[in-house]
Amino acid sequence: MKFSRKLIMIGIAAAAAAAAIILFNISSGLNIVFRYALIVGIVFLALVLEYGVMHSGSAAVVSDAKRLKTVDDYIKAFEAWEYEDTPFVDQIKVAEKQLGSLKRKQAALRSILDDSKDSPFLTTAADVEQYILANSKRILNRVMIFDQGEPYKYNTHAQYLQGVLNENAKVLSDFENLILEVSQIGDDANAATPCLNELTAALRSVREPEEQWNQLMSGEQ
């Protein structure tokens, strides 16, 4: 648990204790059973709040693969990890910014194309999103499996994360080039073929090594 979250829980406990003492004193004229029930209620409320702080937004909860479906889901997961005791906060923030960049680029493309559902560029945009989300999952998985008790493995994990972030940056850059080209020519697939092909090649180049590895592992099983 990160130090900031511990401070919040300490603050809740302190506020609950102060409220219990104050209410117990100002209710001196009331029935003693009611006064103690009031204190119990305050303590219970404090425990509920502390439980919410510990679990409702915890990285373990929001990083559950079953919950991760959309770009916003992954953004929330990365935000939760910023409050955890992890040495990869900088990489997490970069991944979060990349997702925000993806959303802005998608919105720009849809605006240019006037939400034409038949546009091949929107299909490419969906492919880019799937790729970035797959990489976001890889980042979350690597952050989660890092063992704080094995600091000598930090560099290995950090290099892996940086490699994934670099792949995202390359694809997002090519995606931006495609959007710029579309903004100049409109929804004309033939005119934008060079840029579209470049982005498709970029997606293929970063996918193939992982696919080859998965095939190799499947053959060994």
Image (cartoon, rainbow, N blue to C red):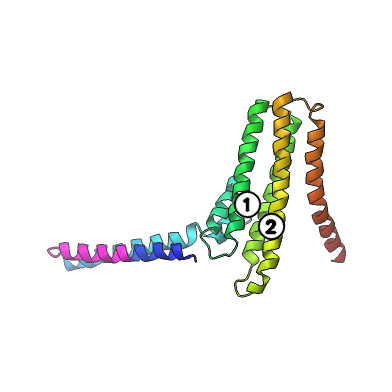
Q: Position of residue 123 (x, y in %)?
A: 74, 36
Res 16 → quadrant: bottom left
From this viewpoint, which residue is outermost toward the left? 29
Residue identifier under label 1: 95
Q: Is residue 105 above or below residue 146?
A: above
Left or right of residue 211, residue 52 in this image: left
Q: Is residue 177 above or below residue 83?
A: above
The residue lying at 62 percent from left, 42 percent from top is 101
Q: At label 2, which amino acid type do we have? A: Gln
Name the foreground residue: 187 vs 50: 187
Q: Secondary structure at mark 2?
A: helix
Q: Position of residue 51 (x, y in %)?
A: 43, 63
Q: Is residue 27 visible?
A: no
Q: Secondary structure at mark 1?
A: helix
The residue lying at 63 percent from left, 56 percent from top is 65
Magenta stretch: residue 25 in it?
Answer: yes
Residue identifier under label 2: 162
Q: Position of residue 27 (x, y in %)?
A: 16, 62
Q: Is residue 75 above or below residue 116?
A: below
Q: At label 1, which amino acid type do we have? A: Ala
Disc number lying in front (2 or 1): 2
Mark-to-mark CA distance, 2 and 1? 10 Å
The span picked out in magenta is 14-30
| Label annotation for residue 61 | none
Q: Position of residue 44 (x, y in %)?
A: 34, 64
**What secondary structure predominates along the stretch shown in magenta?**
helix
